[in-house]
Image: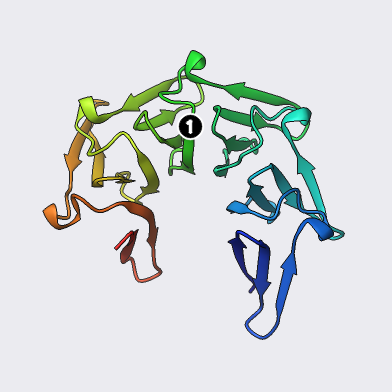
Amino acid sequence: GTLWFGTDEGLLSTDGANWKSFGTKTGLSHERVLDLYEDQQKNLWVGTESGVNRMTQTGFVSYMQKDGLIDDRIRGICQDNLGNMWFGTQEGVTRFDGKNFVSFTEKNGLSNDRIRHITKDRSGNLWFGTYFGGICRFSGEEFIHFTESDGITSDQVLSVFNNDDGDTWLGTLEGVTELKPKVDGTWEIIPNPLGNEFSKRSINTIIKAKNNQVWFGTDE
């Protein structure tokens, strides 16, 4: 397979033997890559400092604010179960069905417009990690929020990981929070389930390996 790397100087790929680079000269809307996402059709989407790009056999198709995005700085990308693409920006989120763009902000139910991360859980709900509004879950019909006032460790959510058992792990500016769904539809919020060792660490990324180990990337 091919590995892809988003950098401040364009997009890189390798098959283990050879490297390729992609930038504005090859059709990318901006050199600074902020997020990468592969959709259900195996298309690679590249979120940049200015616009989102879908890779094609001949280059890139770019979408900008002038095309319908709420903002050009793309920090999160995800596809929902209906095939819509979602793009998280500094000014809210935009949904794209391949033809039309629809945007959502705090006025529509987001907890904060500055989006840091988007992911989808096993039930198809979308989770939006925000800079100043904690975590926001969208069921397709309504938004629900979890913030510091509910018990999460920080309103600055940098990463989100949905476990196979239905639990959601939040990587924040001040450690980890675990959200466990209850049978009555409410949630148990567990701050720093890994112990206080992580309580003051910034958890920038969370990923699960094939051996079921969960890895946390921090500033330290």
- Residue located at (78% from left, 44% from top): 62
Spot occupied by residue 111 in the image (x, y as percentages of width and height):
40, 23
Seen in the picture, residue 217 relative to 112 is either above or below; the reply is below
**Residue at the limit of the structure toward the top, as seen here:** 107
Q: Quadrant of residue 154?
A: top left
- Residue located at (56% from left, 22% from top): 104
Q: Quadrant of residue 181?
A: top left
Q: Is residue 121 left or right of residue 171?
A: right
Q: Is residue 100 left or right of residue 47?
A: right
**Residue at the limit of the structure toward the bottom, as seen here:** 17
Spot occupied by residue 28 in the image (x, y as percentages of width and height):
76, 53
- Residue located at (31% from left, 49% from top): 165
Q: Quadrant of the C terminus?
A: bottom left
Q: Is residue 30 left or right of residue 126?
A: right
Q: Quadrant of residue 185?
A: top left
Counting every numbered tag in the picture gives 1
**Residue at the limit of the structure toward the left, as seen here:** 196
Circle 1 sits on which residue?
114
Q: Quadrant of the N terminus?
A: bottom right
- Identify the element where label 1 is drawn: loop
Observer-nearest residue: 174 or 160? 174
Seen in the picture, residue 169 relative to 140 is either above or below; the reply is below
Q: Is residue 16 left or right of residue 28?
A: left
Rendering colour mode: rainbow
Mark 1 neighbour density, 10 Å: few (under 14) some (14–19) many (20 or more): many
What's the residue type where badge 1 is placed? Answer: Arg
Observer-nearest residue: 82 or 155? 155
- Residue located at (31% from left, 33% from top): 155
Spot occupied by residue 39 in the image (x, y as percentages of width and height):
64, 50
